[in-house]
Image: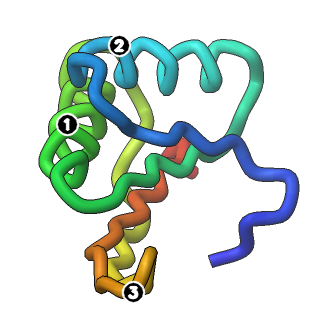
Amino acid sequence: MSEENENIIYVGTKPAIKYAAAVAAEFENGASSVFIKARGRAISRAVDAAEISINRFLEGVEIKEVKISTEEIENRNVSTIQILLSKVE
């Protein structure tokens, strides 16, 4: 996944609908693709945000790629997810 010049939404503790609105705003501002990234307990909220974005706010956008991995933070492993949403060509 190329992350240069890409729009990234980092998911934290806010409701998933807030992140879905941020994704929709990025596409409305001309983005052709948006990354949704989260770690740990926020992963399920990131998945919810992606699904809400596609099903409620956006037409012609699909999940292009999902990447899961593990990062070491403060001597412990934390799961991560990156969801790439792109306009359908």
**Disc 2: CA contacts within 10 A as few (<14), some (14-19) or many (>=20):** few
Q: Residue 69: x and y, percent?
A: 35, 84
Which of disc 3 and disc 2 is earlier in sequence?
Answer: 2
Q: Residue at x 36, y 35 (%)?
A: 12
Q: What residue type is labelled 2?
A: Lys
Front residue of 35/79: it is 79
Front residue of 15/23: it is 15
Cα distance, mark 2 to mark 1? 13 Å
Q: In this view, does 14 lie to the left or right of 89?
A: left
Q: From the viewer's perspective, is residue 63 above or below residue 28?
A: below
Q: Residue 28: x and y, percent?
A: 64, 14
Which of disc 3 and disc 1 is earlier in sequence?
Answer: 1
Q: What residue type is labelled 3?
A: Asn
Instruction: Tell me the residue that label 1 is attached to.
Output: 51
Front residue of 33/14: it is 14
The label number, if any, that marks residue 18 in the structure image:
2
Instruction: Tell me the residue that label 3 is attached to.
Output: 75
